[in-house]
Amino acid sequence: MAFVQIRDMSVAFGSAPALRGISLSVERGEALGLVGESGCGKSITWLAALGLLPRSAKVGGSVLLDGVELIGASPSVLEPVRGGRIAMIFQDPASSLNPVHRIGHQIAEALALHRGLTGAPARAEVIRLLDQVGIPDAKTRANAYPHELSGGQNQRVMIAMALAGEPELLVADEPTTALDVTIQAQILDLLGTIRRDTGMGLVLISHDLGVVSETCSRIAVMYAGRIVEQAESAAIFANPSHPYTRGLLGAMPPISGPRQKLVSIPGSVPEASRMPQGCAFAPRCSEAIADCTRVDPAAVTVEANHLAACIRATPAKTGTRTPERVLA
């Protein structure tokens, strides 16, 4: 059994379906990329799994952590999981860190909550964590306030805080969005190094396939509250079988070689309250046929360990460009 198994999970706010039957698994130590445009439901998937959505959200389906059900679980079951077994790094460190407390104090709070460390042992562990995430002069910087650090350093502080509970799975929600390309590469390399050193699993949420191309071994592509394609990373780039995945790849600029025209995807992700009939991607899809507006396709097996939810899903033509890491 996978470490985390999400089965047919749905989320609705009133009559608006934000997630429409998400099924996903994460193995121990695995690096999974969750990719899609803003509004596809990537963050909501993990907020729902950890019971962090408001009470107005109607959550259905199943989320098993080592066989223990999390959907509808009591606080006594969820509290050791949040930040302990599964930690989450949110998109904007500036809004996640408390501006009136020193960063060392904020990391120490996590240590006290998840590991019972206080006093001198907690202080020593704070410095070790800051060293681990690459903060220079960690002993001094532990006394700094968030506004005294750069965006990249604050993101490293968030990673240190997430590691304080020694999680078995780290969910990084757009951890490089507000950073310049050089710092983006450093943060991604840091996450990869920590994962290899600790054996921790990683879910990297991003809108950019290039960001996850070298960091993750498996990729799931989300659109309008559904997973429309998932496969090993190499298979996604060599044989993209859903038009949305091909659209995301076509919008990626190559770093080397001849110049190529970038192909944008027209329109935008539909609002949850205005979901079109049939395939949600059909109104934006250049390959759509009449049946696409009537049938919401189930995922089919394209090849081993490769699923795509498209009625026209077939192996892609050979010679599809495999991108280099693209961070911009």
Image (cartoon, rainbow, N blue to C red):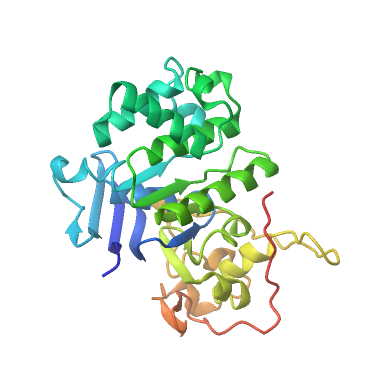
> Is residue 46 something that shows in the picture?
yes
The structure residue drawn at horizontal position 36% and vertical position 37%, both measured from the top left corner, is 164
Q: Is residue 304 left or right of residue 3?
A: right
Q: Residue furthest right?
A: 258
Quadrant the N terminus occupies: bottom left
Residue 90 in the image, given as x and y percentages of width and height: 44, 39
> Is residue 15 something that shows in the picture?
no
Residue 149 in the image, given as x and y percentages of width and height: 58, 24
User: In this orientation, which residue lies closer to the viewer: 55 or 111?
Assistant: 111
Up/down of 71 relative to 30, above or below: above
Up/down of 61 relative to 194, above or below: below
Question: How many labels, in total?
Answer: 0
Up/down of 298 relative to 98, above or below: below
Residue 167 in the image, given as x and y percentages of width and height: 34, 47
User: In this orientation, which residue lies closer to the viewer: 62 or 117?
Assistant: 117
User: In this orientation, which residue lies closer to the viewer: 216 or 237?
Assistant: 216
User: In this orientation, which residue lies closer to the viewer: 241 or 186?
Assistant: 186
Q: Residue furthest top?
A: 100
The structure residue drawn at horizontal position 39% and vertical position 60%, both measured from the top left corner, is 29
Up/down of 98 relative to 259, above or below: above
The structure residue drawn at horizontal position 48% and vertical position 49%, both measured from the top left corner, is 194
Dividing the picture into quarters, in which one does residue 250 lie? bottom right
Residue 241 in the image, given as x and y percentages of width and height: 55, 77
